[in-house]
């Protein structure tokens, strides 16, 4: 019996080794981390959207586990966050490419201006409320024009973006929009939000056809010299409370690879409840990422924290981009 048990254990080890040897390497491994490394970007969206968003994002960076943030360039509180980034140049700051203005009484228009991108504007001259309206009214050329204008605005303010991503996912609403988004990122060699690994959390939200399209675009981005993620976690936006505990639970189940975890860190202010009914959930995001239990879980589980800046530096070391 003992011999048989030992033989079974040996067989299990050999089968595991064989499976591992034949498995596709994660993008973390491709970027130089060990095969079993769990690498995490804790990322805060919507910097610049409001004073409350800036306060929350800054606290999430300084007191919490957030390692990356992205700025909504059409919004009025951008100068405050840009000032912070200039005073803290180590902060990972990208552009949250914004094609929508979704709140009822707090609106913003395109950076390029209505004459340059009329299809992106509603009758009042603001960006459309949602992605469906953008798809129905805007052309890919207008979308690309606005993408470039938002990136150039941040560059003109003295900040080189570490990455670009998409507010409300509008740039993934059609293949044509996504193509322009990737085109600009590749041209300017600015990392884009691209995923092509195991996509465990993504597959819970998307159909097979969408997953295949996401992977194809991401693999193109990798071939052109940009880093790629293995997974994206966005579920925390729908969590109501107790987010610290939920983050700890989620981190415990992470698969090897690079996972980006998106939050909308926000601090309570007088104006934020007037802007959005999601204010309480956003407060909970801040509380979650500054919860000491989350940092403790990261340390105890050997999770590696990273930034978009580091991902691009590692991608540059891997090899030349394909022509």
Image (cartoon, grey):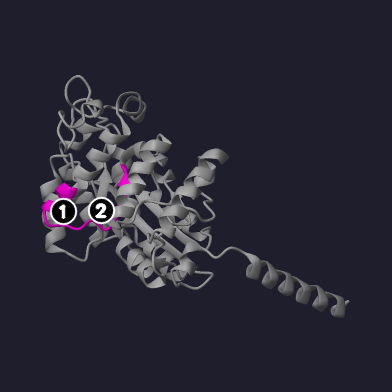
Q: Is residue 133 left or right of residue 215?
A: left
Farthest-out residue, top: 123
Local crowd size for mark 2, using a 10 Å CA cut-off: few (<14), some (14–19), many (≥20): many
Q: Disc 1 on helix, strand or loop? A: helix
* Whether residue 287 is situated above or below residue 135 in the rendered picture: below
* Whether residue 253 is situated above or below residue 139 in the rendered picture: below
Quadrant in the picture for residue 236 = top left
Q: Which residues are magenta?
A: 152-166
| Closer to us: 249 or 167 | 167
Q: Disc 2 on helix, strand or loop? A: strand
* Whether residue 257 is situated above or below residue 124 in the rendered picture: below
- Mark before the other along the chain sequence, 1 or 2: 2
Residue 264 shows in this picture: yes
* Whether residue 223 is situated above or below residue 181 in the rendered picture: below
| Closer to us: 217 or 21 | 217
Q: Is residue 178 left or right of residue 53?
A: right
Question: Image point 27% across, 55% down: which residue?
Answer: 188
> How many labels, in total?
2
Q: Which residue is mark 1?
A: 155
On residue 94, the disc is: 2
Where's residue 122, x and y in %?
A: 22, 23
Which numbered disc, 1 or 2, marks the residue closer to the eye? 1
Which quadrant of the rendered structure holds the N terminus?
A: bottom right
On residue 164, the disc is: none
* Magenta stretch holds residue 112: no
């Amino acid at each position: 019996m003992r011999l048989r048990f030992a033989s079974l254990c040996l067989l299990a080890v050999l089968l595991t080794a064989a499976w591992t040897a034949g498995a596709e390497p994660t993008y973390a491994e491709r970027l130089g981390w060990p095969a079993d490394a769990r690498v995490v970007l804790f990322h805060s969206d919507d910097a610049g959207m409001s004073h409350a968003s800036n306060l929350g994002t800054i606290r999430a960076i300084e007191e919490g586990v957030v390692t990356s943030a992205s700025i909504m360039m059409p919004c009025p509180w951008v100068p405050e966050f840009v000032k912070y980034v200039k005073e803290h140049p180590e902060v990972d700051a990208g552009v949250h490419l914004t094609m929508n203005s979704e709140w009822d009484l707090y609106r913003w228009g395109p950076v390029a201006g209505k004459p340059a991108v009329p299809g992106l504007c509603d009758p009042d001259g603001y960006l459309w409320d949602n992605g469906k309206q953008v798809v129905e009214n805007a052309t890919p050329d207008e979308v690309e024009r606005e993408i470039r204008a938002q990136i150039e605005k941040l560059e003109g303010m003295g900040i080189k973006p570490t990455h670009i991503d998409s507010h409300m996912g509008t740039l993934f609403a059609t293949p044509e929009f996504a193509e322009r988004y990737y085109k600009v990122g590749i041209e300017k060699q600015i990392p884009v939000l691209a995923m092509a690994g195991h996509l465990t959390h993504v597959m819970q939200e998307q159909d097979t056809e969408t997953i295949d399209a996401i992977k194809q675009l991401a693999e193109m981005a990798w071939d052109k010299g940009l880093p790629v993620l293995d997974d994206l976690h966005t579920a925390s936006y729908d969590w109501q409370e107790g987010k610290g505990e939920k983050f700890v639970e989620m981190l415990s189940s992470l698969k090897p690879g690079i996972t980006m975890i998106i939050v909308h860190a926000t601090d309570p202010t007088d104006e934020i409840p007037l802007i959005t009914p999601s204010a309480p959930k956003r407060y909970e995001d801040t509380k979650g990422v500054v919860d000491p239990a989350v940092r403790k879980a990261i340390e105890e589980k050997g999770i590696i924290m990273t930034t978009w800046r580091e991902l691009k530096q590692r991608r540059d070391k891997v090899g030349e981009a394909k022509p």
